[in-house]
Image (cartoon, rainbow, N blue to C red):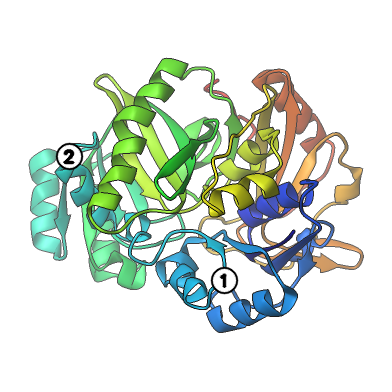
């Protein structure tokens, strides 16, 4: 089979690599891809928002199906565009992608179908939003309604921080149109985990769970980021809780979307927090999480290509998972998640051994690589335990000089 993976980040590199390992897949294309993917895919320099260009390419190359990585093309309707041309593609329709594209849509859906989540209110103006914050106090959570590349959430520990976040989004337009409406939620305390599922034609295929680390610095301090590292499995979350999450959250969400006339196909990412009242939804995404994909997909024992072909054809399929633990650490450019400088040379990555390097924001430079974004790459290892995988990764990371870059030294500490 020939497969086209759409996107350019670390998540897409992990998807590309999993397809390239599948005996059933003879050719993997990545569009637009990144320089670090060249070992695992043929790169096609077509922007992920150029739907016509991507569809033409898929047709010309005789691609069996396309797989969409990032949220932006999904929210803009790439799946509808491909399907209208008779092309097979995996992902939600524009309507169904609202479960991620609008926080307010997702909260209203959960309220209507009694899916457990935090209490909330939605605001488009500053004054009532501030009044709500003053009334409820801190800690409190402020979310931009639309897409903000994983950075549109502020967990405010003081009322002042919350007010500042509301001003930034509604007045300062920090996230542009995405922040013209905000959702303010009660703060939930507990252990978080990511529960991702393949969904197609009403069938749900859950993946093994993972946990990512959102804060920039050790000890879960600093600003929220797109994710600084992740690991799987999550030993502190019992199988009983995973099963409860499936029956009380994931299944009802898929059924709710169908009932609303917006059936969901694609990857349903459920961000969950285990509270004293049981598991509750933090957020839904309409695609793989990043960096969770980089630690979940390597645990898949099944042939990824065969599995995808089966579910896209409406045939029943099964997934097998490895018991090995996988832990990954993100290397980010100094200054991330704010402004970063591009072009800083990376150390010689060929000196890393016994680990996997997933490229996110890198560019080829003088036979090596340089940083070309905020999150530059992820280094992961597998092992019989989280501690074993963690030791392996950090031993390798600590052996190289990372001038101009930083990484957390405590990924996996909660396990």
Q: Residue at x 67, y 21 (%)?
A: 323
Q: Which residue is drawn at 58% across and 73% down?
A: 48
| Residue 243 marker | none
Q: Residue at x 35, y 59 (%)?
A: 96
Drawn side of residue 218 relative to residue 72, left or right? right
Q: Nearer the viewer, residue 81 or 406?
A: 81
| 87 relative to 294, above or below | below
Residue position marked by numbered label 2 in the rendering: 119
Residue 286 x, y percent position in the rendering: 43, 54
Q: How crowded is mark 1: few (under 14 residues within 10 Å), some or many (20 or more)?
A: some
Can the viewer see residue 235? yes
Mark 1 or mark 2, which is nearer the start of the sequence?
1
Q: Which residue is drawn at 29% across and 70% down?
A: 172
Quadrant in which the C terminus appears: top right
Residue position marked by numbered label 1 in the rendering: 87
Comparing labels 2 and 1, the label whose residue is closer to the camera: 1
Q: What is the distance, in whole Å, between disc 2 and disc 1 at their CAs?
A: 41 Å
**Residue at disc 2, secondary structure:** loop
Quadrant in which the N terminus appears: bottom right
Can the viewer see residue 238? no
**Residue at disc 1, secondary structure:** loop
| 119 relative to 40, above or below | above
Q: Nearer the viewer, residue 116 or 150?
A: 116
| 183 relative to 409, above or below | below
Q: Nearer the viewer, residue 161 or 284?
A: 284
Residue 352 x, y percent position in the rendering: 86, 41
Q: Quadrant of residue 397?
A: top right
Residue 310 x, y percent position in the rendering: 60, 48
């Amino acid at each position: 089979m020939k497969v086209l993976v759409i996107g350019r980040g670390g998540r897409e590199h992990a998807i590309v690599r999993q397809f390239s390992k599948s005996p059933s897949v003879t050719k993997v294309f990545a569009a637009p891809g990144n320089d670090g993917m060249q070992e695992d895919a043929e790169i096609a320099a077509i922007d992920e928002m150029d739907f016509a260009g991507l569809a033409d390419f898929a047709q010309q190359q005789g691609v069996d199906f396309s797989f969409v990585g990032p949220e932006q093309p999904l929210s803009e309707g790439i799946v509808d565009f491909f399907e209208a041309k008779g092309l097979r593609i995996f992902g939600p329709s524009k309507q169904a992608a609202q479960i991620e594209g609008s926080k307010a849509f997702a909260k209203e859906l959960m309220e209507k179908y009694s899916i457990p989540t935090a209490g909330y209110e939605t605001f488009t103006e500053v004054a009532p939003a501030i009044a709500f914050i003053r009334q409820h106090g801190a800690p409190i959570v402020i979310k931009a309604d639309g897409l903000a590349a994983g950075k549109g959430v502020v967990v405010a520990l003081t009322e002042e921080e919350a007010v500042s976040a509301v001003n930034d989004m509604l007045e300062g337009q920090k996230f542009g149109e995405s922040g013209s409406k905000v959702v303010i939620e009660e703060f939930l305390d507990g252990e978080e985990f990511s529960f991702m599922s393949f969904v197609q034609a009403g069938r749900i295929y859950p993946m093994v769970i993972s946990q990512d680390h959102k804060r920039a610095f050790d000890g879960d301090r600093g600003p929220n980021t797109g994710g600084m590292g992740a690991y799987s499995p999550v030993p502190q979350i019992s199988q009983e809780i995973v099963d409860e999450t499936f029956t009380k959250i994931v299944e009802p969400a898929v059924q709710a979307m169908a009932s609303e006339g917006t059936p969901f196909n694609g990857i349903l990412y459920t961000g969950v927090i285990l509270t004293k009242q049981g598991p509750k939804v933090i957020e839904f995404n309409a695609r793989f999480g990043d960096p969770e994909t980089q630690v979940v997909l390597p645990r898949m024992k099944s042939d990824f290509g065969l599995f995808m072909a089966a579910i896209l054809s409406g045939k029943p399929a099964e997934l097998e998972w490895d018991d090995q633990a996988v832990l990954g650490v993100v290397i980010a450019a100094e200054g991330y998640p704010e402004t970063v400088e591009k072009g800083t040379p990376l150390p010689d990555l060929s000196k890393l051994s016994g680990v996997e390097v997933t490229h996110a924001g890198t560019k080829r430079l003088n036979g090596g690589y340089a940083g070309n974004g905020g999150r530059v790459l992820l280094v992961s290892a597998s092992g019989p335990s989280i501690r074993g995988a963690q030791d392996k990764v950090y031993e390798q990371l600590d052996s190289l000089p990372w001038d101009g870059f930083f990484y957390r030294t405590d990924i996996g500490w909660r396990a």
